[in-house]
Every structure is written in C-alpha cells, then in structure tokens.
Amino acid sequence: MSFLSDAEIVITALEKYHQESISRKKPVIRQEPLETLVSDLDLSAHITKGGLKGDRLAQFLARYLESTTRLLHPAYLAHQVGTSHYAGALAALIDGFTNNPMAIYEMGPGAASIEWTLINWLLEKVGWRPQPLRLTNNTDPIFGGGVLTHGGSLANLTALLAARSRVAPKAWQEGNPGNLVILAPPESHYSISRAAGIMGLGRNAVYPMAVEEQGVIISDKLPEVYARLTDEGKSILAVIANGCSTAAGLYDPIREIGEFCNAQKLWFHIDGAHGASALLSKKHKNRLDGVELADSLIWDAHKLLRTPSLCTAVLVKDARTIDQAFQQEASYIFHDKDQPGFDFIHRTVECTKAGLGLKWFFVLAALGEQGLEKHVDDQYELAAQAFDYIESLPEFSCAAAPQSNILCFRINGSDALQLEIRDKLIAQGDFYLSTTEFGGRRYLRLVFNHPDTNLDDIKRLIKDIRDMVNLN
Ligand SMILES: Cc1ncc(COP(=O)(O)O)c(C=O)c1O
C-alpha cells in the first residue's frame, strides 16, 4: 500500500533532517533564488504528471528539505515561531489525514472535545472560571470561554470583536458608531491596527498610549488620556496591553492597567500571543500579575510552546461576549438540532476550522505541563545569561534587560552595520537572527526557542560578528 511505504519515506527523510539540524551539520538558513527552486524541484512537471511517490517522492523530499529554513537547528534564533516537538508534528499528520473541521461538533467530536478541554485548562491558568460541561439552571451565568484560531492576528481580531459585542452591541447589524477608539501601546503588534482596519474603525482609531523609553505603558497616564477622550466624546472599545511585546519581549504593567479598566468598566485586552506562556511558569508568571483583571487574552502555542504553526487561543472572561461576537446566519449549519456536543463556529471568523487543538494537546501530553514549564524557564534563563554575557563586552550593548526569551543587542556602529551583519550571517548560514527597531535604533534580535541552544552558541555568534567587523 503506497500510504505506508510513502509514509516511511517521509518519516525516514524527516528523521535524517532532524539529526542534520540538531547536530548543526547543515546551515540553519540557505536562501536560494526562486528560479533555482522552481526548476530544481521540478514543480511544473510534478503538477502536470502527478505520481509523486516512491523514489520520486524520496528525491523530491530530499531537495525540498534542503530548501527549508531549519527551525530544528539550535542556531535558529530569528523569529518567534517555535521549534516544534515531533509529537505536535504527528498530530498535524493525524489532523491532516482525518481532516475533521470541528467548528461544528458533528464534524469532529474528538477534536472539539480536545479544544474544549484545552480552553478550560487555559482559562484556569488565567484565573477565569472554566466553561461547565453542561449548562443547568444552577450554572453561574458568567464563565469563561474561548476558541482556537489560526494565529495571533486572527485571535486579536476575534477578541476585539468580542469587546465590540459588549461595548457597541448593535455594531454587527448597523455598523460602528463613529466614536469608537482603541487604546494601545505604540509597541503593540501590527495585527492590532490591522484589526481596527478590518473592523472598519480605521487605523486612526488606535490611540497610542503613553510609554516610557523602553516602550512600556505608563499606567499612571491612563486617567489623563481617558478623561481627554471622554471629553472629546469618544467611546473606548478596548484598552490593550502587551504581555509581552513583539520587538523586545517586554511586559506592560498588567495589574495597574487592569485595576484602572475595571474601575472605569473598560474592556481590557492582553495580547499575550508571545508572552502568556509565562503563566505556565512558577518563576515567571508574576510578569502577568493581574491577568485575571482582563476581559480577553490571546495566547499562541506555536511561539513558545513547541507546537507546529498555527495554534492560538482566544480567551474571554465572559463567554457570552465571544458567543455574540459573530451574529451569523447560515441555514445549513446554524440551526436548532438535537445533538450532543458544542459548536465552536459561533466564536470564530473561520467556517471550516482545522482541529488545531490536537497539535497543542499532543505536545502537552508528550511533555506534560512540567515539561512545558521547564521549556519556558530554560528559554527565559538563556536570554538572561546571553544578556549578562553580551553586556560584559565593551563593543556591544543590549536594548533592555530581557523579561522573556527575546533579547535585542547591537554592536557599536551604525544601524546599517547591524543590517549588514545580519545579511552576512544569513549568507554564511551558521546563525539566523532577526533585527528590529527599538528606541529609534536598529538592533540585532535573538529569540530563544530551541531546547538545545546554549550560551556557547551565543559566544560563537559574537565571535563571528567580531570577525566580520575585524575586532578579533
Ligand atoms: C504580541 C504579538 N501579537 C500578535 C502576533 C501575531 O501572531 P501570529 O503571527 O500568530 O499571527 C505576534 C507575532 O509576532 C506578536 O508578537
């Protein structure tokens, strides 16, 4: 049967790929021109002729894997997308094959029950009441809710739609009132202003909050901006905090912002796409102290939690808000039915929705909560060690002491020099890192994600950089 033999070819190739990557034998990144890949992979011929299996499959896969950026390589330090655990990859295979789009329960009861359980597990980590399995007359009407989406960008949009269902409940039918605004730190991820654009609020409706020099919200300034906006007749859709920020991984003061929002009855949203995973760590969860004061939070598993992309949880304190975020009619799916289970379709932009929870669940079930806690702790610790090391070198400086697994640093010199260094590193293929602007200057940026990356890697990286600028 070709499934078994082709699966064996795929798994064998992946095992070799894994070994070559973790042993640092192959370059972490190799950028080839588009025309080379289109030709080497013989893409047009495969599309026309079909029959990609057996030896042809093996040959194709070998060349394809050479063309990948290796997130399984310990020198992968560039972006927030994490190093997958193989258990999550196996789950992706299972989900791909069974193809149960579980947004309606009848199309994937097992996947829906996993998503239900994960959402409740996460709600408890935040400190919100989980969803009861059965609603009875005695059920407290306020319990949390959530849904898994394809990524943090869609999740931020979903959370803001839940906020709008509370703040401007008629907006779904009648359009937005013209005075809705969002308060967000300038360091917020671009998906926030994108969501404002998609929702028809316009990017200009996102008001930048006052921040200190490292871009962290100054919560004491909130009353002032609130008073000014209220005087101007604005209605605040949501106040947004980073937990943590994209560029430098810094956390906003969640408790202070939450207390203000709760007192003024403002919707408080935490973008925890990157940093909410600290809630799994006894050592680092204080970074999100006060998280329970929020109304919504998003949390990516494909960043710090070794889960293959994409898998994000949108969580709300009051399930009714997300249940009213989309007031849709579609007679072929939205109708009364006497069936078991729970439909997530009311909570999501997506109609056909993959069983994303299986990937997160498999990683969790393989490593256990403690395993993921250790992973978060290790990555945060490595960022702290790298900071100490880099700060001890006179030619280098860091943007800020790390609060997560992100560290931004630069070598003395111009912004152009930092970009040149990154280009050279990519061309060499031994290290892959990103850059960002922070405080008006260009920094090299490290995101620690791989369980095998260690301080010696960082020492080698620094040596390579010094060689490049002739400092050694
Ligand atoms: C704070 C924050 N929010 C949202 C996002 C968007 O997440 P995704 O890439 O999963 O759409 C990111 C991604 O970098 C992020 O750092």
Image (spheres, grey):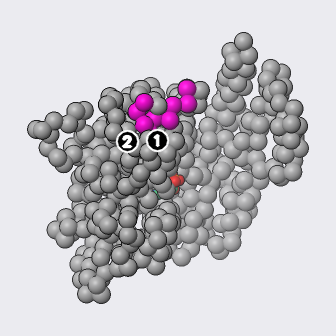
**Residue at the location (87% across, 32% down)?**
49
Outermost residue, top side: 1
Q: Which residue is mark 1?
A: 332
Outermost residue, left side: 138
Helix, strand or loop at mark 2: loop
Where residue 19 sits, quadrant-wise, is: top right
Where residue 435 sits, quadrant-wise, is: bottom right
On the question of residue 408 being in view, the answer is yes
Q: Which residue is mark 2?
A: 335
In the depicted view, which residue is nearer to us: 152 or 448? Answer: 152
Q: Is residue 2 magenta?
A: no
Contact check, label 2 and label 1, Cβ < 8 Å: yes
Q: Is residue 103 magenta?
A: yes
On the question of residue 23 being in view, the answer is no
Q: In the image, is residue 302 above or below residue 392? A: above
| 293 sits left or right of 347 in the view | left
Q: Quadrant of the C terminus?
A: bottom right
| Three-letter code, disc 1 | Tyr
In the depicted view, which residue is nearer to us: 452 or 309? Answer: 309
Where residue 134 sits, quadrant-wise, is: top left
Q: Which residues are magenta?
A: 98-106
Badge 1: residue crowd in 10 Å (few <14, some 14–19, many ≥20):
few
Q: In the image, is residue 374 above or below residue 76? A: above
**Residue at the location (37% across, 38% down)?**
343
| Three-letter code, disc 2 | His
Secondary structure mostly seen in the magenta stretch: loop
- Label 2 and label 1: CA atoms lie apart by 7 Å
Q: Position of residue 458 (x, y in %)?
A: 58, 49
In the depicted view, which residue is nearer to us: 404 or 196? Answer: 196
- Mark identifier at residue 162: none
**Residue at the location (72% across, 42% down)?**
68
